[in-house]
Amino acid sequence: MPHEPTGSCPLVQRVAVKRCPACASTQPVENFYTTRRGRLSGYCKSCQRAAARLSDRRRDAAIRLLIASHPEEYQVWLRLVRGGGQSDIAGRGAGDAA
């Protein structure tokens, strides 16, 4: 008897899983973010969060190093951002050193 598409056959449901290359585990697709294009992200949510935390720590460390290397400039810019006005940098030219 030929198959008739009447819906009488039960649908075979596949378990949707994906492998994360960072942690090498196979996880359900719910553990992966969806990109703006509607595709699944390459890495699982926990690995992406760990990578974001590491990136934040590296950025914070770089900022601390820059501040420590140029404390006078940092104080000038900090006053400017906090509303100190242009008077702090008015006497300097564009290429002058601090």
Image (cartoon, rainbow, N blue to C red):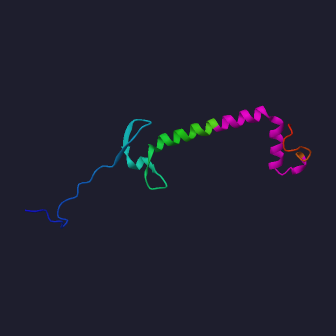
Q: Residue at x 71, y 35 (%)?
A: 64
Q: Residue at x 33, y 49 (%)?
A: 16
Front residue (pair 70, 7): 70
Secondary structure mostly seen in magenta is: helix
Q: Quadrant of the N terminus?
A: bottom left
Q: Residue at x 81, y 44 (%)?
A: 77
> Which span is picked out in magenta?
59-87
Q: Is residue 86 left or right of residue 55?
A: right
Residue 67 screen position, x and y as percent: 76, 36
The residue shown at (47%, 41%) is: 46
The relative height of residue 11 versus residue 32 in the rendered view (above or below) is below
Place of residue 56 in the rendered image (x, y in percent of width and height, measured from the top left): 61, 40
Res 97 quadrant in image: top right
The quarter of the rendered structure image containing the C terminus is top right
**The magenta stretch spans residue 61:** yes
Give how far across and how far down residue 18 sits, in percent.
37, 44
Furthest toward the right, the residue is 91
In the picture as drawn, the residue positioned furthest to the left comes out as: 1
Give the percent coordinates (x, y) of residue 28. 37, 46
